[in-house]
Image: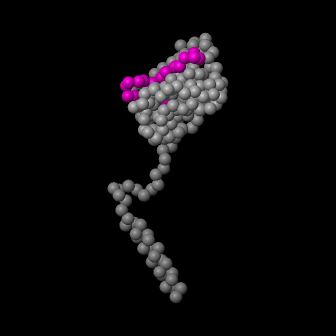
Amino acid sequence: MIRITHFLRAAAVAGLAAATVILPTHGGASAAPVTPAAPSATVQAPALSAAAKAYTAKFKGAVCVNGHVENIGWQGWRCNRSGRPVMVGTTGQSLRLEAVSILTTKAGGICAKAHVQNIGWMRTRCARANRIVTVGTTGQALRLEALRLSTAKRVCAEGHVQNIGWQGMECARKWNWVEVGTTGQSLRLEALKVLV
């Protein structure tokens, strides 16, 4: 009786194994689990230009931004004083913003977090005052879809989004996040205005 039970159990296991081998894989796709894409390596922006260094030395409330744009690459550092926003990216050209670098001189540093096509929210990056923080990707043809910014004092931002246009300036204080762009809509962030 015991031999018959073992025989039936072995036959059942062999039958399941055979059934697994026979199952179709629909177009040759493997049955291996899909692993999510690994987060991209840290993106490095070009060093601060001589003009940007001179500007930040002269105006202690400055913010400088550099954008990496589809088909253009890094646009170059653009700086402005407190009270006036600085803009990177393009409008009316249907080009995606892929990465952003920001430096502040008086806001107690800045933190940034990017939402990137096929990746989602990337790791938060922070930098002290007079240091550069960079988020997004380069060389991967991935659109920046949303961006979060935070400072020790106050930060305002406005995004220009595909099919939407300018979203309106939003502000946040004391390490709260201001968010521009969209998530879950597959829309590219095309331009960004920042005011610190």
Q: Magenta stretch: residue 84 in it?
A: yes
Q: Is residue 16 above or below residue 75?
A: below
In the image, is residue 155 above or below residue 55? below
Q: Which residues are magenta?
A: 81-99
| 70 on left or right of 195 | left
Q: Residue 108: x percent and y percent?
A: 66, 24
Q: Is 129 on the left-hand or right-hand side of 85?
A: right
Q: Position of residue 23 (x, y in %)?
A: 38, 65
Could you say where residue 112 lies in the image, as x and y percent from the top left? 57, 31
106 vs 19, left or right, is right
Q: What main secondary structure does the magenta stretch of the protein show?
A: loop
Image quadrant assignment for residue 62: top right
Q: In percent of the image, x 48 and y 38: which residue is there? A: 183
User: In the orientation shown, which residue stands out farthest toward the bottom?
Assistant: 1
The one nearer the camera, 169 or 5, is 169
Q: Is residue 138 visible?
A: no
Where, quadrant-wise, is the C terminus in this rendering? top right
Q: As rendered, which of 83 and 147 lies closer to the eye?
A: 83
Residue at screen point 57% across, 17% down: 83
Residue at 48% over, 77% down: 10
Q: Is residue 6 above or below residue 105?
A: below
